Structures are given as C-alpha cells and as structure tokens.
Image: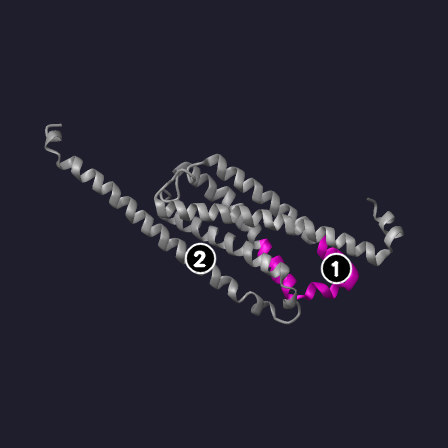
Amino acid sequence: MEPSFLLSLFGQSAAMEFLRMGTVYGHLIACCVAIGLVLTSDVAMVRELIKGDKAHLQDARHMESLQRSVSWALGVLWVTGLAIIWIDVTEKGLSYLLNPKLQAKVAIVTLLTFNGVLLHRLVLPALQKAGSLLALRFNMRMFALFAGALSGVSWFYAAMLGVGRPLSWKYSLAEILAAYPVLIVGGFAMMVALTCWAKAREEKTEADVFVPLVRNPALAAW
C-alpha cells in the first residue's frame, strides 16, 4: 500500500501511527524468533553437558541452520529498528536520538552483530572440526563460552529495553547498562563451571574404562 494512499485515507498523523505499529510488530516478531532459537539451543547445550550427550553438539547442519536463522532475524531487527528510529525522528526531531535507552539498545545490537560475526567465522568452524564443545582447545572453548554468554544476555537485555518504555529519559546510559556486564560475567562464569565439571566427568569416565583394560590379565601378552 502506497504511503500517499495512507495519507489521503487516514491523514498524516494516523498513517504514521499505523506505519510505526506495523514496523514495531515486525520488529517484535523478529526478536521473538531470534530469542526462541537462542534459548532452545542454549537449553539443549546445557542439558547435553549435564547428561554427557554430544549428539546435538556434533550436528553441524543444525548449527549452520541455527546461525543462518538468527542472522536473518538480526537483519530484520536492524531494518525495522532503523525504520522505527526514522519514524520517531520524523515526528519528534533529532533530539530523540539523545534518548539513553535508545542509545543503549543500539549499542547492544551493534555488539550483538559483531559477536555474531565472530561466532560464525571462528566458533562454528572450530565446533564443526572438534565435534563438541568439550573437545575444543582451552582458549577456543573459553572464547566460545564468553561469546555464547554475551549473545544470550544481549538478546534478552535488548528485548527488555525494547519494552521498557518507562526507562526513556529517566536514567542515564551508564545506569541503564549497569546490569549488562554483570549478567554477561555471571553467565560466562556459570558456563565455565558447568563445562569444567562436564570435562572432568568425561576424563574420569575415560580413565575408568581404560584402567581395567590395562590391568586385564587376558590382555597382558598383547
């Protein structure tokens, strides 16, 4: 539907309201899709680390599909988000860009985009080569855990800012982002503890299997 038709039918103010509502709706759907994919993948990874199952982690096609879907959702978020900003700037002027809540959300989504590029170019190929998270080298495993924690926290924090209308103009940028690094560090620490526990359990299981084979008298002559 052409903008001129909307203007003639509803008037400029009403047309902009409908345009903004439709854009916000698309923005919300993209955010829900991305958060759903990230959440289900993270829950599956935690469950498999606890149970010692590697089937999900070894599924390279699943990882590629997940990354592709999240990338598409992130692209839609950028397009619709910039459209919303353009509409609001048109109505409220350039002073709208000084809103600390808006600045915080843009900063987080920018960091999320950069983090997604690193996940796609570094972490995903390493996971496909190693076969599982626990099989990664220590440095790469720590990087993967940090990038994963940053991704999960960023998606939920950005969603919170998206619905947090009461935060507009009431708090500074530093105050709005105060909990953000704390949540990232906390999520990273929990995942490090979980993977260390899973790694120790895996090594103990392998040792328990190996020792009886070495001490088996039937195999002593081999």
| Secondary structure type for disc 1 | helix
Residue type (three-letter) at the residue carrying disc 2: Gly
The answer to if 101 sits in the magenta stretch is yes
In the image, what residue type sits under mark 1?
Asp
- Residue 117 among those drawn in magenta: no
Q: Which residue is mark 1?
A: 88
Camera-nearest residue between 66 and 9:
9
Can you tell which mark lies on residue 163? none
Q: Earlier in the sequence, mark 2 or mark 1?
A: 1
Q: Position of residue 204 (x, y in %)?
A: 25, 45
- The residue indicated by pointer 2 is 187
Q: Which residues are magenta?
A: 83-110
Residue 150 vertical placement versus 123 (above, below): below
Q: Could you tell me which quadrant the N terminus lies in?
A: top right
* Vertical position of residue 205 compared to residue 10: above or below: above
Mark 2 secondary-structure assignment? helix
Number of numbered discs visible in the structure rendering? 2
Q: Position of residue 56 (x, y in %)?
A: 43, 39
Which corner quadrant holds the C terminus?
A: top left
Q: Main secondary structure of the magenta part?
A: helix
